[in-house]
Image (cartoon, rainbow, N blue to C red):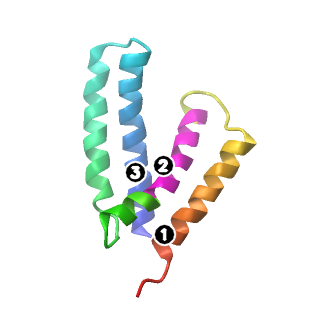
């Protein structure tokens, strides 16, 4: 279950890091916005290495579900746009896929 915590923290730092670059390059904010973005992306990468998975590719694949759900939370909380039912359905499907990848018995 620590993996879920690491996934959630990684998602927070990846999304906020990428959003900093989005604000700088797409919304014409100051170039200083790139600095916390870079720090956030480094923290994201470090946190993702803490996940309890045998292979990096499997960890990244499982992380995708959390990332998608967290992105929709960001959409709602930061960008003040509520996800629609298709966003929610897609996120639920991805979280189920994440669970299969992460918790499947391996031989």
Task: Please tell me which residue is depicted at 43% across the width and 17% down the height of the picture.
Answer: 26
In the image, residue 5 lies in the stretch drawn in magenta: no
Q: Residue furthest bottom?
A: 107
Dot 2: what SS? Answer: helix
Mark 1 and mark 2: Cα distance apart in space:
14 Å
Q: Residues within 10 Å of mark 3 (few under 14, many from 20)?
A: some
Nearer-N-terminus badge (2/3): 3
Q: Are marks 3 and 1 in contact (CB under 8 Å)?
A: no
Mark 2 against mark 3, which lies toward the viewer?
A: 2
Q: Could you tell me how far apart the alpha carbons at marks 2 and 3 are, in whole angstroms?
A: 10 Å
Report the residue that reaches farthest toward the right: 85
Q: Quadrant of residue 21?
A: top left
Asked whether disc 2 touches disc 3, contact meaning CB atoms under 8 Å apart, the reply is: no
Query: What label does residue 9 carry, if any?
Result: 3
Q: From mark 3 to mark 1, how far is it between C-alphas?
A: 19 Å
Q: Residue at x 31, y 22 (%)?
A: 33
Q: Main secondary structure of the magenta part?
A: helix
Residue 17 spot, x, y in % from top left:
35, 35
The stretch in magenta equals 63-76
Q: Position of residue 22 (x, y in %)?
A: 41, 24
Measured along the vertical axis of the image, is residue 52 above or below residue 83? below
Residue marked by disc 1: 101
Question: Is 72 within the magenta?
Answer: yes
Disc 2 target residue: 67
Helix, strand or loop status at disc 1: helix
């Amino acid at each position: 279950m620590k993996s879920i915590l690491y996934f959630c923290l990684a998602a927070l730092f990846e999304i906020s890091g990428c959003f900093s670059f989005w604000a700088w390059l797409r919304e014409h904010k100051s170039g200083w916005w790139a600095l916390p973005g870079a720090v956030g992306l480094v923290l994201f990468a470090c946190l993702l290495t803490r996940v309890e998975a045998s292979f990096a590719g499997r960890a990244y694949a499982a992380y995708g579900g959390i990332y998608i759900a967290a992105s929709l939370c960001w959409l709602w909380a930061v960008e003040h746009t509520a996800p629609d039912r298709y966003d929610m359905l897609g996120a639920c499907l991805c979280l189920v896929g994440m669970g299969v990848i992460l918790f499947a018995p391996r031989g």
